[in-house]
Image (cartoon, grey):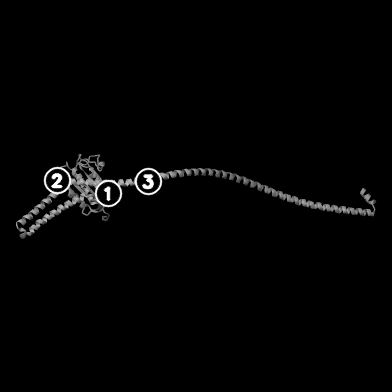
């Protein structure tokens, strides 16, 4: 009311001026309102942006928390790996130290091995020399046993040689007598017959001497096909006179077919003579003396058995019978080498020899030899 009264008291110019002022004020207010509105809208935009920034910051904070958690996890894992690496490094140091010690031990072992190899080489050379000496001694021992057997055969062989020599003297004497009687021209055929008979006796004596020389010489190490029956018969022929003088009957049972083994004839003959000699001595106290020799083929092997009907071997001595220098004979009656040499020769021929003992009834030596491969 007071403003209305005041406006009524004003003049037209004053009102117009006042109106103009009001318009200016209104325009100023509108501008201020417009600016306020723009500021409000800007503030709303700013608030919106701040809200978005806050959300982004919240998301970034959560991402940062996850990153920190991952970092902490990685840090813990790296710490554990660092500890493991540290432990591995310490273990590696121990391993390296052990490896160094092992290398030192290996070096010492290598040096020791070099010394051992050197000693082994010297020992091997010594063993080879010893083996060579042993083989030479064994060959000498076999030869000594053979010569001892040959010495035992001398008496019988001398008797066998005496018969041909007497016969030679008789036949040659007859031829001389015929010539002295002047029958050289009238009956030359009779003289030639006497001389031919003398030559047959010479060949017989030569054969005996040749057999003794062959048996007496050192046997070679060669192996060749040997007819077994021939070797057995030759062995019996050398012992024939001794067996005859002691009234010992020899029963020989050989197969019809020819039996051939791969071996050394002289060595096998020595084996058979040793067994015959052993059987001969075992029959010294027996009334009816019999030596039985059998030969049988069993597959790839041949069995040769030399048996006698003597008292046999005393119980408990079967395991020692092949030992060198072991003998059941009286002192000075035997060398104890025969069966030992026999055992060694049979083993060299890839054979075997065993004893079949029957105390009070006799004993037998069974020899097994492989047949010649061509005969299988």
Asked whether 159 or 274 is in front, the reply is 159
Which mark is drawn over residue 64?
none
Q: Secondary structure at mark 2?
A: helix
Query: In front: mark 3 or mark 2?
Result: 3
Q: Quadrant location of residue 277?
A: top left
Q: Secondary structure at mark 3?
A: helix
Q: Which numbered disc, 3 or 2, marks the residue that appears first in the sequence?
A: 3
Q: Which numbered disc, 3 or 1, marks the residue that appears first in the sequence?
A: 3
- Neighbourhood count class around disc 3 (C-alpha, 10 Å): few under 14, some 14–19, many 20 upward: few
Q: Which numbered disc, 2 or 1, marks the residue that appears first in the sequence?
A: 2
Report the residue at 93% width, 53% height from top. Answer: 15
Question: Cα distance, mark 3 to mark 1?
Answer: 33 Å
Query: In front: mark 3 or mark 1?
Result: 3
Label 3 belongs to which residue? 118
Tell me residue 53's x, y (percent): 71, 50
Label 1 belongs to which residue? 348
Question: Cα distance, mark 3 to mark 2?
Answer: 62 Å
Which mark is drawn over residue 245?
2
Question: Cα distance, mark 2 to mark 1?
Answer: 34 Å
Tell me residue 283's x, y (percent): 18, 43
State yes or no: discs 2 and 1 in contact (Cβ < 8 Å): no
Q: Secondary structure at mark 1?
A: helix
């Amino acid at each position: 009311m007071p403003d209305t009264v005041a406006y009524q008291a004003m003049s037209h110019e004053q009102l117009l001026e006042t109106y103009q002022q009001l318009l200016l004020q209104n325009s100023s207010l509108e501008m201020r309102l417009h600016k306020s509105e723009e500021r409000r809208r800007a503030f709303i935009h700013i608030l919106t942006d701040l809200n978005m920034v806050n959300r982004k910051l919240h998301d970034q904070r959560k991402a940062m928390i996850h990153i920190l958690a991952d970092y902490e996890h990685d840090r813990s894992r790296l710490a554990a790996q660092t500890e493991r690496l540290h432990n591995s490094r310490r273990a590696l140091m121990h391993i390296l130290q052990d490896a160094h010690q092992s290398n030192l031990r290996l070096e010492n072992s290598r040096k020791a091995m070099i010394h051992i190899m050197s000693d082994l080489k010297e020992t091997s050379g010594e063993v080879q020399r010893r083996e060579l000496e042993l083989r030479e001694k064994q060959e000498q021992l076999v030869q000594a046993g053979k010569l001892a057997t040959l010495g035992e055969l001398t008496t019988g062989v001398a008797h066998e040689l005496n018969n041909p020599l007497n016969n030679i003297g008789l036949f040659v004497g007859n031829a001389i007598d015929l010539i002295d009687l002047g029958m050289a021209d009238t009956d030359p055929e009779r003289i030639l017959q006497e001389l031919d008979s003398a030559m047959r006796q010479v060949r017989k004596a030569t054969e005996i001497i040749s057999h003794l020389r062959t048996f007496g010489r050192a046997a070679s190490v060669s192996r060749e096909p040997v007819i077994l029956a021939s070797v057995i018969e030759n062995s019996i022929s050398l012992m024939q006179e001794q067996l005859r003088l002691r009234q010992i009957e020899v029963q020989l049972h050989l197969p019809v077919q020819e039996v051939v083994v791969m071996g050394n004839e002289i060595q096998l003959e020595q084996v058979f003579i040793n067994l015959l000699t052993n059987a001969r001595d075992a029959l010294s106290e027996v009334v009816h003396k019999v030596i039985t020799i059998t030969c049988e083929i069993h597959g790839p092997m041949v069995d040769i058995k030399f048996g006698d009907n003597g008292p046999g071997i005393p119980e408990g001595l079967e395991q020692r019978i092949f030992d060198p220098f072991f003998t059941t004979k009286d002192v000075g009656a035997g060398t104890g080498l025969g069966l030992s040499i026999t055992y060694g020769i049979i083993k060299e021929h890839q054979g075997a020899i065993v004893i079949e003992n029957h105390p009070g009834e006799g004993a037998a030596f069974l020899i097994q030899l492989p047949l010649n491969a061509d005969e299988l």
